[in-house]
Amino acid sequence: MARRKREEEHENHERWLVSYADFITLLFAFFVVMYALSSVNEGKYRVLSSSMVNAFRSVPVNSASQAPVLMPIQPITPPPKATSASKTQEVAKQKQRDKMRNVAKDILEVMAPLIEQGKVRVLETSRGVTIEINDSILFSPGLALLQPPLVKAMRAIADVLAGSDFPITIEGHTDNVPINTVQFPSNWELSAVRATTVLRLFADAGVAAERLTAIGYADTRPVEPNLLADGRARNRRVTIMIDSAIPEKGTEVNLEQQAVNSKSVPPPAATAQPEPALPR
């Protein structure tokens, strides 16, 4: 029986189309993913769209050729820089900070011996400089007269403050041990008179009286617990606060405007109160 001739296989020259199609599919998927991950700024898109629409609406057309006539491009003006008022205010604040640093430096120099003994602390706060003096070196127990050795040191502080223009607040603080004498019925009077005593010394040394304020806090602002003797001694102190903030001018509150504002604000919704439980 005659053998059947084997048919010759034709070589497929279009195989590259399969690889090319796969590549195009992957490339399309890549751009789809990139588009999905991208975020469009809708605000900027709307501004651009509206500006382009307005520009093409307002472009004049040449009647002869019906072609738009290009208008000259207007230069974009940069946003205005900081106003002179804000610059002036910033310069004034910087001058205040420089003056406060000089005051703090001078106080550290005149109070260096007491600072080394731990009787005086100089703190820098957001409001300015605070001088915290332990009242054991200023006053005798239950009295408000300055001890003679500390008068010279307090006058040295006053000489430094007299050359500046910062507001000064003098605070008197006590511990929680009650006092009841003819002169000081409570710690309120004792703390207030001690603060006033330091204020009078500053005023006599040349510090302007309108810059001085005296406050007595009694035992309402302790810095340490009053349980132990060390804590009570820490709480008995006189604090001199030098305020570096520039005072702002107040604005008068208009009662009529306040009434209008109160009417515009809706009253809070009434909440149901639980009824008291009846005895069983």
Image (tube, helix red, strand yellow):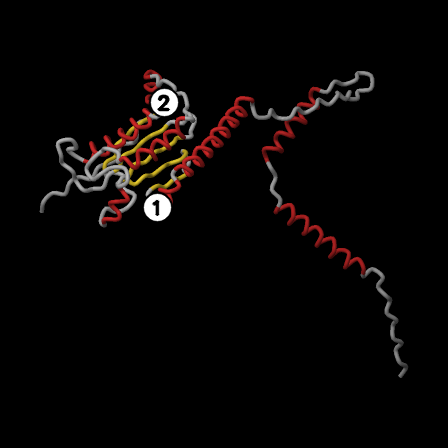
**For marks 1 and 2 on the same chain, the one whose residue lies earlier in the sequence:** 1
Find disc 2 in the rendering and name its residue.
Answer: 208
Label 1, label 2: how far apart the Cα atoms are: 30 Å
Label placed on residue 191 = none
Label 1–label 2 contact, CB within 8 A: no
Find disc 1 in the rendering and name its residue.
Answer: 117
- The crowd level at tag 1 (other Cα within 10 Å; few <14, some 14-19, many 20+) is few
Asked whether, in this view, residue 4 is left or right of residue 160, the answer is: right
Examine the rendered structure and indicate whether residue 84 appears above or below residue 269.
above
Q: Which residue is located at x 21 percent, y 37 percent?
A: 273
- Could you say which is closer to the camera, residue 82 or residue 78? 82
Can you tell which quarter of the image residue 240 is in? top left
For the residue labelled by badge 1, is the local secondary structure a helix, a strand or a loop?
loop
- The crowd level at tag 2 (other Cα within 10 Å; few <14, some 14-19, many 20+) is some
Q: Which residue is located at x 29 percent, y 28 percent?
A: 214
Can you tell which quarter of the image residue 67 is in? top right
For the residue labelled by badge 2, is the local secondary structure a helix, a strand or a loop?
loop
Examine the rendered structure and indicate whether residue 78 appears above or below residue 34.
above
- Could you say which is closer to the camera, residue 72 or residue 274? 72
- Could you say which is closer to the camera, residue 47 or residue 144? 144
Q: Residue 43 in the image: state x and y as whole percent.
A: 59, 33
Asked whether, in this view, residue 84 is left or right of residue 65, the answer is: left
Quadrant for the N terminus in the image:
bottom right
Disc 2 marks a residue whose amino acid type is Ala
Q: Residue 58 in the image: state x and y as whole percent.
A: 70, 19
Q: Which residue is located at x 36 percent, y 24 percent?
A: 206
Q: Which residue is located at x 43 percent, y 35 percent?
A: 104
Taking the view exactly as shown, the residue that stands out farthest to the left is 280
Asked whether, in this view, residue 242 is left or right of residue 219, the answer is: right
Disc 1 marks a residue whose amino acid type is Gln
Q: Residue 272 in the image: state x and y as whole percent.
A: 24, 36
